[in-house]
Image (cartoon, grey):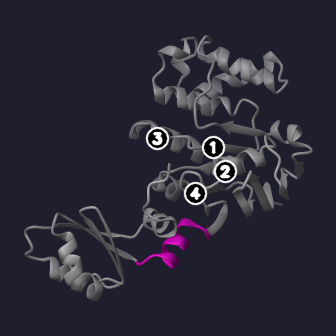
Amino acid sequence: MSVVKAADLHKSYGEQKVVDGLDLQLEPGTCHGLLGPNGAGKTTTLKMLLGLIEPDGGNIHVLDLPVPSLARQARLRIGVVPQMDNLDPDFTVTENLLAYGRFFGLKDAAIHERIPSLLEFAGLTSRANVNIQTLSGGMKRRLTLARALVNDPDVIFLDEPTTGLDPQARQVIWRGLRKLLSQGKTILLTTHFMDEAERLCDMLTVIDHGKMIASGSPRELIATLIEPDVLEIYGEESAGWGQEHAAKLCDRFEQAGETLFCYTRQPAPALEALMGNTSLRYLHRPANLEDVFLKLTGRELRD
């Protein structure tokens, strides 16, 4: 049975359709990524799944409970990591966990019993009694994740959990999330980091303008939606090289500033044409999820 199931979701604000006929299904013990550019409808979808806003149409079941009518009961079994840390700056690390556990109606004794394992999970055992304001950004983010587990949730909603973190902090959080998956937890993840989605997610739903535009595992999407080889060609003369060679040597190509992206199933002819050209630098690599994302949603900046 699906942990989260949403069908034909709709949400508009005035004339603007924010979510437009979206279907979403999360299977137990998996990480499901919800990807899309800014304004695609990701956060609105999360809020509807949590029962924080009511859809204009469609139906939602979370942990076999109808939402929003029984959203409060469902949220007792959900952990949420919001985009922005909302820890209480006047409390210590332990006090933040204790206060949050009380929101779920947990007894202090039960929360104190869980706190050591939560601190160990977040790598904050030595910081148990320090004030929040003394923590680094990475520590705060790890504490926010640990706090989301205080009620031992069955499903965890993560809204861009590693934004603004350095590579070391991201790796720590990734290890923690993989541990949760190994324990049978179900995760819904929104992220702008395609490498994060590729590493963590079993399934992906890509949305834009409130509609689903692709769905599948990272490997499936890369295999079916993009050419297998990419040449990134850099330099002021990349556009000239593209005009001369790209149409003949690339299955598909895009110019972005001083970089030409050559997507191909047979890279050898393009590589041969680049050899000896000292005015251009180039990188030959396999296609990845970011290539898929940009093909589906475009390279234009979204604000």
Tell me, yes or no, whether the two marked residues, 2 and 1, touch with CB atoms within 8 Å: yes
SS for callout 4: strand
N-terminal of the pair, mark 4 or mark 1, is: 4
Identified by mark 3, the residue type is Arg
Measured Cα–Cα span from mark 4 to mark 1: 12 Å
Q: Does 63 sit above or below residue 76?
A: below
Residue bearing mark 3: 170
Residue 152 in view of the camera = yes
Measured Cα–Cα span from mark 2 to mark 4: 11 Å
Residue 184 in view of the camera = no
N-terminal of the pair, mark 2 or mark 1, is: 1
In the image as oriented, which residue stretches furthest toward the right?
Answer: 69
10 Å crowding of disc 1: few (<14), some (14-19), many (20+): many
Percent across and percent down for residue 217 are: 59, 67
- In this view, the mark in front (4 or 1): 4
10 Å crowding of disc 3: few (<14), some (14-19), many (20+): some
Measured Cα–Cα span from mark 4 to mark 3: 18 Å
N-terminal of the pair, mark 3 or mark 2, is: 3
Identified by mark 2, the residue type is Leu
N-terminal of the pair, mark 4 or mark 3, is: 4
Measured Cα–Cα span from mark 3 to mark 2: 17 Å
- Quadrant holding the N terminus: bottom right
- Left/right placement of residue 77 relative to residue 294 reads right
For the magenta stretch, what is the residue range? 214-227
Residue bearing mark 2: 188
- In this view, the mark in front (4 or 3): 4
Residue 158: image tag: 1
Measured Cα–Cα span from mark 3 to mark 1: 14 Å
